[in-house]
């Protein structure tokens, strides 16, 4: 199977037995489909795999309601050595009591990061994206953080 993401569309080519092409439509952020698309892209992106090959840590996101988001949103990603081992949309915080990083942002700020209007490092330094966890580890892995955001931006074609 060959997996490619282009403009938010996911193309899966299956060579055997009949050269089948499966196309998945882009998903709107925030949605479970968007998070699954991010997982697939993280696991198929060779650039991310190389840059994040030494990353060890899971992320729990809290997105605070604002604008069109009426209730708090949570999602979880388990990232390990350039791969995404698990995602979960709207998990309860007690499901993952000790994630490596807890990230909190308003809906406006997270969508600004996803649309490229707000630099993620600037967001962290100005507390528009609050990070609980080892900032030293995060700072030593800035290329991984930035490439994670690049992949997330690649799968974000529409924002609610």
Image: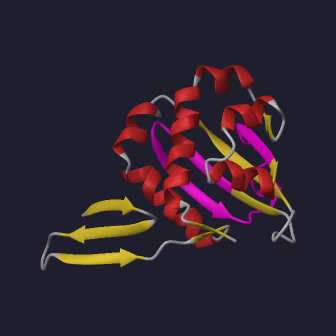
- Quadrant of residue 102 within the rendered picture: top right
Residue located 72% across and 42% down the image: 99
11 vs 143: above or below: below
- Quadrant of residue 65 within the rendered picture: bottom right
The reply to whether the magenta stretch includes residue 103 is yes
Image position, residue 142 (x, y; %): 58, 27
- Describe residue 86's horizontal placement relative to residue 43 as left or right: right
- Describe residue 101's horizontal placement relative to residue 2 as left or right: right
Residue located 38% across and 48% down the image: 45
Residue located 24% across and 69% down the image: 13
Q: Nearer the viewer, residue 143 or 85?
A: 143
Q: Considering the image in quadrants, where does the C terminus appear?
A: bottom right
Image position, residue 156 (x, y; %): 56, 61
Image position, residue 159 (x, y; %): 65, 67
Task: Report the number of numbered marks.
Answer: 0
Q: Considering the image in quadrants, where does the N terminus appear?
A: bottom left
- Describe residue 22's horizontal placement relative to residue 156 as left or right: left
Is residue 52 among what the camera can see?
yes
Residues drawn in magenta? 76-104
Image position, residue 32 (x, y; %): 62, 70
- The colour scheme used to paint the residues is secondary structure
Residue located 45% across and 76% down the image: 25
């Amino acid at each position: 199977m060959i997996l490619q993401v282009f403009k938010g569309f996911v193309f899966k080519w299956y060579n055997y037995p009949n050269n089948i092409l499966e196309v998945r439509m882009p998903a709107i952020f925030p949605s479970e489909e968007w998070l699954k698309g991010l997982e697939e892209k993280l696991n198929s992106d060779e650039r991310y795999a190389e840059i994040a090959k030494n990353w060890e840590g899971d992320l729990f996101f809290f997105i605070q309601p604002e604008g069109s988001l009426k209730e708090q949103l949570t999602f979880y990603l388990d990232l390990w050595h350039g791969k995404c081992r698990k995602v979960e949309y709207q998990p309860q915080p007690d499901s993952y009591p000790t994630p490596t990083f807890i990230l909190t942002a308003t809906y406006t700020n997270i969508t600004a990061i996803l649309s490229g209007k707000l630099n993620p490092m600037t967001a962290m330094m100005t507390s528009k994206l609050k990070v609980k966890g080892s900032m030293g580890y995060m700072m030593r892995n800035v290329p991984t953080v930035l490439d994670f955001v690049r992949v997330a931006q690649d799968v974000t074609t529409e924002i609610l």
